[in-house]
Image (cartoon, helix red, strand yellow):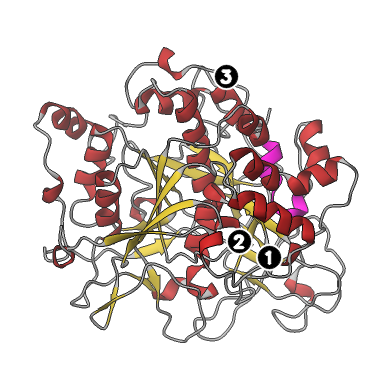
């Protein structure tokens, strides 16, 4: 379709060897050697680089120690008075500031309740605990790296210069779906404030583990998959303070709000996506039900997140609330779901809980550059990790239908959930890569278990049944920029719920930005089984 009809072009991101390197020039010689291996394009070398830091810890070498700090002990928000690591109570409260600037608050990390082998191999403090805790290297060693899969990511702008994305197979839809003053906004950006969200979300899927300046790098679950990237939201804060919830929007060329996530999903399906990872939430808009029905009809799995706080109404967050969609809550290394003022974040439509607290992150308000690693929390991070797990299962069992893959997802949480026990915080339990990989999904019914026929969740179950019996509509039936699309407010699920704190190296003075308050509580129900077991 021509650009005037709402469709954009696609630009394949060049590999790092084909473009200037504007980040990470200070890496050690071992990092440079690893990067050279990556440029040769060998999957085994990529997996070796991704595990390089963890292997050093197994040999007894110290891992980077990345303590968190409690800003309530600071005289000024964003300035630490000492380099002392704070107690591990993970409690915190919002600190008000005038206007629309976010408070600086951070909770200390708790130690992990993980299998002994995982706890010995990985450090919570480096933000990569999820790799060993969920035994991802074992899947890589079995050849399950995402090869042959096409995964779409719909998010905010992408910074293609992140070292962790140097060798990833990424195709970016240019321009974005968003306009400012009638001009199309590029889908890529080097600005750390506006591009950090989309960049880190993609890195949790495609990252090779290489960081800037010898720091740890974001490690993705499925580094060898093909990625399609669509920018469906931008940040335009009125006070110039950077990435915050106040300026998230995506206007059309006429300056009106539009259903940009819907449009991006339509294009992702057109472009052959097997899985769509969406760490954004909005009101939906015209075509919202239709694109969900189409994804189900064509076997495309949609993974999204639940809100990061109980203040937000999950009924207002689309596509996470939609029937048939995988809705993910976030847990930390101690298997505890994030909280709001000490109350566990529980929603009636959670599908599973996945790793999303204490995760490695680059860029954003905390640093305003791409060279300093930080730790972050949010369902925005749990969403791509869960999507990656689903992708590896899909790679191992290519003959299983998407419906059967979803059956396996909910039947094989923790060490197994054959009776489909359910909890409003954990859903059917903590997602388990190992348990899913050990079970052939083709033994399950070819029915989407996430289509709820008991309530008014949209689209209705009857809509799915009717859609399956109707002739398939063409892609041209999707709404375009020229059609009447109602306002669709967009909220990245990390905003309002992510905790971003600087990784402290040596005597580095830290700045911490926290966009939510939370307090650890004990997990409930049998769902507290670790996904790594």
Q: Which residue is mark 1?
A: 212
Q: Residue at 35%, 64% (x, y): give it.
A: 490
Q: Residue at 53%, 49% (x, y): give it.
A: 206
Q: Of 282 and 300, which appears nearest the observer?
A: 300
Marker disc for residue 478? none
Q: Which residue is mark 2?
A: 163
Q: Residue at 57%, 19% (x, y): give it.
A: 438
Nearest to N terminus: mark 1 or mark 2: 2
Is 124 inside the magenta-drawn segment? yes
Measuring from the top left, give residue 508's x and y in whole percent. 80, 75
Quarter occupied by the C terminus: top right
Whether residue 366 is visible here, answered yes or no, is: yes
Q: Which residues are magenta?
A: 123-133
Q: Which residue is mark 3?
A: 438
Nearest to N terminus: mark 1 or mark 3: 1
Is 201 inside the magenta-drawn segment? no
Label 3 and label 2: CA atoms lie apart by 33 Å
The answer to whether the residues at label 1 and label 3 have Cβ atoms under 8 Å apart is no
Mostly what secondary structure, the magenta segment? helix
Nearest to N terminus: mark 3 or mark 2: 2
Report whether 248 appears left or right of 430: left
Quarter occupied by the N terminus: bottom left
The answer to whether the residues at label 1 and label 2 have Cβ atoms under 8 Å apart is yes
């Amino acid at each position: 379709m021509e650009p005037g009809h709402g469709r954009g072009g696609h630009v394949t991101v060049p590999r790092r060897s084909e473009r200037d390197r504007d980040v990470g020039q200070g890496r050690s010689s071992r990092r440079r050697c690893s990067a050279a291996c990556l440029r040769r394009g060998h999957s085994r070398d990529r997996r070796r680089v991704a595990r390089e830091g963890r292997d050093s810890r197994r040999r007894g070498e110290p891992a980077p120690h990345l303590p968190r700090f409690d800003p309530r002990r600071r005289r000024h928000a964003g300035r630490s008075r000492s380099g002392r690591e704070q107690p591990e109570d993970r409690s915190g409260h919002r600190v008000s500031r005038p206007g629309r600037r976010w408070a600086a608050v951070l909770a200390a990390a708790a130690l992990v309740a993980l299998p002994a082998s995982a706890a010995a191999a990985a450090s919570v403090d480096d933000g990569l605990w999820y790799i060993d805790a969920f035994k991802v290297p074992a899947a890589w060693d079995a050849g399950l790296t995402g090869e042959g899969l096409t995964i779409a990511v719909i998010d905010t702008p992408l910074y293609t210069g992140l070292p962790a994305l140097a060798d990833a197979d990424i195709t970016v839809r240019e321009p974005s779906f968003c306009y400012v003053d009638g001009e199309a906004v590029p889908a890529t950006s080097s600005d750390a404030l506006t591009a950090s969200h989309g960049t880190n979300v993609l890195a949790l899927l495609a990252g090779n583990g290489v960081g800037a300046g010898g720091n740890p790098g974001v490690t993705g679950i499925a580094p060898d998959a093909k990625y399609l990237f669509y920018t469906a939201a931008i940040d335009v804060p009125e006070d110039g303070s950077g990435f915050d919830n106040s300026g998230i929007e995506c206007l059309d060329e006429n300056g009106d709000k539009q259903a940009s996530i819907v449009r991006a999903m339509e294009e992702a399906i057109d472009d052959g996506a097997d899985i769509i990872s969406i760490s954004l939430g909005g009101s939906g808009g015209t075509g919202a039900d239709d694109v969900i029905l189409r994804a189900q009809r064509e076997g495309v799995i949609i993974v999204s997140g639940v809100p990061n706080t109980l203040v937000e109404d999950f009924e207002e967050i689309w596509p996470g609330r939609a029937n048939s969609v995988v809705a993910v809550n976030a847990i930390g290394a101690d298997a505890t779901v994030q909280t709001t003022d000490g109350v566990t974040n529980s929603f009636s439509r959670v599908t599973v809980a996945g790793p999303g607290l204490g995760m490695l992150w680059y860029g954003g308000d905390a640093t305003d550059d791409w060279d300093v690693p930080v730790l972050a929390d949010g369902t925005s991070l749990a969403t791509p990790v869960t999507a990656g797990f689903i992708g590896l299962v899909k790679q191992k069992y290519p003959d299983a239908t998407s419906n059967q893959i979803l059956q396996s997802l909910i039947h094989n949480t923790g060490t197994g959930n054959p009776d489909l026990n359910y909890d409003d915080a954990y859903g059917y339990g903590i997602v388990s890569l190992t348990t899913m990989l050990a079970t052939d999904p083709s033994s399950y019914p070819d029915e989407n278990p996430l289509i709820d026929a008991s309530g008014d969740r949209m689209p209705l179950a009857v809509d799915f049944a009717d859609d399956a019996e109707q002739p398939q509509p063409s892609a041209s039936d999707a709404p375009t920029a020229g059609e009447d699309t109602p306002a669709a407010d967009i909220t990245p699920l990390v905003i309002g719920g992510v905790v971003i704190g600087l990784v402290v190296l040596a005597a580095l003075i830290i700045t911490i930005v926290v966009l939510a308050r939370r307090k650890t509580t004990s997990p409930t129900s049998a769902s507290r089984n670790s996904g790594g077991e």
